Each structure stands twice: as structure tokens, then as C-alpha cells.
Image (cartoon, rainbow, N blue to C red):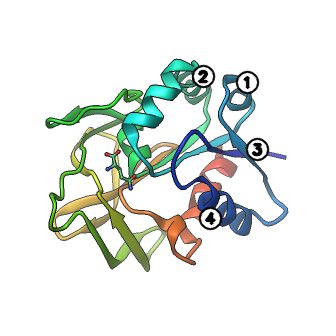
């Protein structure tokens, strides 16, 4: 059975594990992963929201970043939510940096909504085989300021790209794990089934 992990270094890991479990039913094994050995056996990985500096630093310290890069080259699907989106981005711009992993061809700016708007909730039209409305929570979210060729936009909020996909790499700048809607978790699992 295919194995899907949540990177449990820091952040909203439990919420992702619960949502994944709900979406997976009996079809996938869901595990938490925070060592290179645990990453090495995964078919899919969620990098949760949290603090990208902390997750990035610890991942580097324990060699987890290298394990993620290697496994991704071998075909592991990765979904980064919020801080996770920052970490899987190829490029970061702006004053705030993090030890990102250069996986997905997007450019991201941390904390780009500024103080007033740094947290908000809304409903988003998400384009997954037809348009669906999902609830979306943004918490000190980054902005995806540029996408490379081959990156598909799956959702926008006002003029900002908030969900995108490149092959089996997925990013959302919002937090589906903090709502009851498991549509995006199910979509991520469908990417793993295809690979
Ligand atoms: N502001 C955080 C960062 O830059 C991300 C916030 C989140 O994941 N909710 O790392």
C-alpha cells in the first residue's frame, strides 16, 4: 500500500494527519515522518504550515532536506501548505528568507500580505476537474509572486495565485487542514495514485 507522510518537525501536523486519514480511508498508509529514513520510504509528503525558518533549519540540521530532494527526484509527490509552500519553492524574494529546497518552479515572498491582512478566511473557487468552492484560511500567508513554465494555477484570491501545481508538486498558501473540507487532501492523494 502506498505510504503518505506528514513532515512532523514543526507546525500544524496533527490536523494534516487527521484530514489525510479521513481522505485516505483504507487506501493509503498515513504516517508521520521526520527522519531521512522515514522520508526515504514515502510516496507522498505534506509539508505543513508553521514557521518556515524553523522547519527549514531543523530539516537541514538532520539531513531531512536532502532526503526530501532525493525522494522527490525519484517521484515522491509533495504538497506544501503555507510555510511548506515557502520551503518547496525554487526562489524566495523579499526581506525574509528561509532554507528553501528548490523543488517547485515558483517564486514566493514570505509574509507578503502585511500586518492588516496577515490572517483572513474566505471561500475560494478551486479548479480541479471543474470549479469547486472550498473554505480557505490564510495565516500570515506568503504570496506566490511568479510561476515558471509548466506550473498550473489551480486557485486565485483577488489577483494572487494561492494554489498551484507542477507535476506531482502542489502548493497552497492557505490551510485546508484547518477546515472540515477534505477535497484538497483527496486531490493530493489522487496525484500519488497516478504516479
Ligand atoms: N509566516 C510563516 C512563514 O513565513 C508561514 C505561516 C503559516 O505557515 N501559516 O514561515
Left or right placement of residue 142 versus residue 170 in this view: left
Q: Residue at image x 59%, y 71%?
A: 182
Mark 3 burial class by Cα count in 10 Å: few <14, some 14-19, many 20+ = some
Coordinates of residue 66 in the picture (x, y in percent): 54, 19
Residue at disc 1, CB closer than 8 Å to ligand 1: no
Q: CA distance from mark 4 to mark 1?
A: 26 Å
Along the line of sight, which residue is nearer the eye, 18 or 135? 18
* Marked residue nearer the N-terminal end (2 or 3): 3
The circle on residue 86 is: none
* Marked residue nearer the N-terminal end (4 or 3): 3
Mark 1 burial class by Cα count in 10 Å: few <14, some 14-19, many 20+ = few
Q: Which residue is mark 2?
A: 67
Q: CA distance from mark 2 to mark 4?
A: 25 Å
The circle on residue 37 is: 1
Tell which tag, 2 or 3, sits nearer the viewer: 2
* Marked residue nearer the N-terminal end (2 or 4): 2
Number of dots carrying numbers: 4
- Check the image and report above or below for 101 versus 82: above
Q: Which residue is mark 3?
A: 3
Q: Residue at image x 20%, y 61%?
A: 160
Q: Secondary structure at mark 3?
A: strand
Tell which tag, 3 or 1, sits nearer the viewer: 1
Q: Quadrant of residue 27?
A: bottom right
For the residues bearing labels 1 and 2, Cβ distance under 8 angstroms: yes
Q: Which residue is mark 4?
A: 186
Amino acid at each position: 500500500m502506498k505510504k503518505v507522510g506528514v513532515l512532523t518537525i514543526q507546525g500544524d501536523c496533527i490536523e494534516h494527519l487527521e484530514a489525510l486519514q479521513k481522505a485516505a480511508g483504507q487506501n493509503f498508509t498515513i504516517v508521520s515522518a521526520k527522519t531521512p529514513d522515514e522520508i526515504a520510504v514515502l510516496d507522498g509528503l505534506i509539508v505543513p504550515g508553521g514557521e518556515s525558518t524553523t522547519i527549514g533549519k531543523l530539516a537541514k540540521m538532520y539531513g531531512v532536506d536532502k532526503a526530501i530532494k532525493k525522494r522527490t527526484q525519484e517521484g515522491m509527490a509533495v504538497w506544501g501548505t503555507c510555510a511548506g509552500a515557502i520551503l518547496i519553492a525554487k526562489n524566495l524574494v523579499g526581506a525574509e528568507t528561509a532554507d528553501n529546497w528548490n523543488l517547485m518552479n515558483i517564486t514566493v515572498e514570505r509574509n507578503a500580505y502585511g500586518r492588516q491582512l496577515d490572517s483572513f478566511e474566505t471561500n475560494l473557487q478551486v479548479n480541479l476537474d471543474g470549479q469547486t468552492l472550498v473554505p480557505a484560511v490564510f495565516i500570515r500567508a506568503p504570496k506566490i509572486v511568479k510561476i515558471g513554465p509548466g506550473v498550473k494555477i489551480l486557485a486565485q484570491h483577488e489577483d494572487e495565485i494561492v494554489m498551484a501545481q507542477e507535476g506531482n508538486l502542489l502548493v497552497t498558501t492557505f490551510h485546508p487542514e484547518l477546515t472540515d473540507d477534505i477535497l484538497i487532501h483527496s486531490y493530493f492523494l489522487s496525484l500519488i495514485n497516478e504516479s
